[in-house]
Image (tube, rainbow, N blue to C red):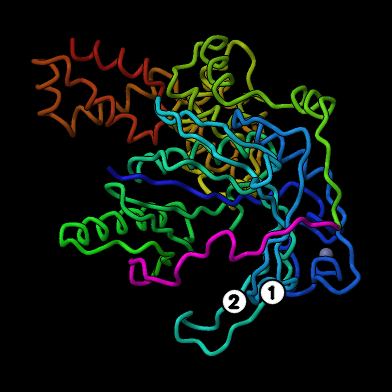
Amino acid sequence: MTKIGLEIHCQLTKLESKLFCSCKANYREFEPNHNICPVCMGLPGSLPMLNQKAVKSATSIAMALSCDTPEKIAFFRKNYFYPDLPKNFQITQLNVYGDMSIGGEGYVDVEGKKIKIRRIQLEEDPGRLIYEGESERTKITLVDYNRAGTPLVEIVTDPDFENPRQVRVFLNILSDLLENLGVSEPGLEGAIRADGNVSIEGGNKVEIKNIGSFHDLEKALHFEITRQQSLSERDIEIVQETRHWDDKRKITVSSRSKEEDQDYRYFLENDIPWVKIDQEIITSLQKDMPESISSKKERFVKKFDIAPQVADILASDKYYSDLFENAHSNSDAKDIANLITTDLMGFVDTKEKREESKLTSHHLSDLIAAINDKTLTRTSSKTALQEIVKSGKSVKELLSEMDLGQVSDSSEIENIIIQVFEEEKQAVLDAKENPETVNYLVGKVMQKTKGKADPTKTLELIKSKLG
Ligand SMILES: [Zn+2]
């Protein structure tokens, strides 16, 4: 049986400062090595100060993942040398002397299967190495310490996944949950990274690292399962090791034998006192906890009578659900939900497009109102929506500027129907024989009016003309 476990690193991107100093958590805006100080560089004599907000954010993640939270937490030094780690140790958490990390023993429900969360810990992100040219052949490696010390939450699962598809579903659920909590922005490059470990038929466990995206992780897992199966069929031992995903060749390559915990010479970080997580903090976090995605979905279905699939799309994406919640009034909620999930999704499908979009909740309410009072057809509303996303113009402005108004005037529609009947003689005969084919003619009229003809009236007029 295939067993897959995950180690997910999630940056707390919504925080102001790094985990142990006042440098910015948002390192992305800086020139290389311009977001650093003696603390995150580990200079002698500097002392770390724990970011209390990071403790709260990490605790809220633990609570949202149904974890137990300890009464007090401690930090440890994990010693190893690597050029992106200026202190030569990483400040992290460890559970060997009892449960001292920020959470553990939680779970996530993935399509009816419980995926156990073994542990959640708060730690600092290392810096970044930048390879000039191709990473394997380059002689030049640059290092940027701007990221060093940014707050990171590590989430470790049990090897409960049976296939890469379950992993993908889980990561989507987790990303939505973190975004909904308001602690991280999954759309930011490098904000959520996942490593996997794979074993088959009770064999040795192989870890896969260096994975750029969730999509690559799925490919890497598929490759690794096939590699292990083929070794096992030939009775070759599967070595316990760490392998790197080579994005160019789409294979995993052996990188080093796996360090054991003792290789890291963990010891208590004495510069940071133990932190008490008292009931008061837990209660206040519980009070501020946003509505969960599943209960939001349930509310949308119950209160607004929205189809469960539509409610699911809305509730699991904070961008859409915020737009929806700010736009809806009880009467047109269903229409707005449909407008978002059928038309808008195609126009704002990336983080960049969402940031550039000029669309507000008001636009959505105005569009639905224009469709309902028949000044705009459903087809034209799509054109209008696309234009609003680009320019932010009001629905009223667009109606006058873009000639989108619905054509309801019978004689105007009738003239077009006459033209269509001339051009589509066979279709007219077909429609007389078989009334179900009448939609073809309606379609032709809509085409000629660029979607502006009132569809109900068009159908009525065509039917009466067919006799
Ligand atoms: Zn710093």
Query: In the rendering, at what x and y percent does residue 335 appear?
Result: 51, 20
Residue at the (65%, 40%) spot, across then down: 393
Q: Residue furthest right?
A: 45
Q: Nearer the viewer, residue 437 or 75?
A: 75
- Residue where numbered disc 2 is placed: 130
Q: Earlier in the sequence, mark 2 or mark 1?
A: 2
Number of numbered markers: 2
Answer with left or right where residue 55 lies relative to residue 403. Answer: right
Instruction: Look at label 1 and name its amino acid.
Output: Asp
> Is residue 257 magenta-colored?
yes
Q: Is mark 1 within 8 Å of ligand 1?
A: no
Helix, strand or loop under label 2:
strand
Query: In the rendering, at what x and y percent does residue 100 appear?
Result: 71, 42
* Other-residue count near label 2 (Cα within 10 Å), few / some / many at <14 / 14–19 / ≥20: few
Answer with left or right where residue 375 lies relative to residue 322. Answer: left
Q: Nearer the viewer, residue 455 or 429?
A: 455
- Report the span colored magenta: 248-270
- Residue where numbered disc 1 is placed: 144
Query: In the rendering, at what x and y percent does residue 23 appear?
Result: 83, 61
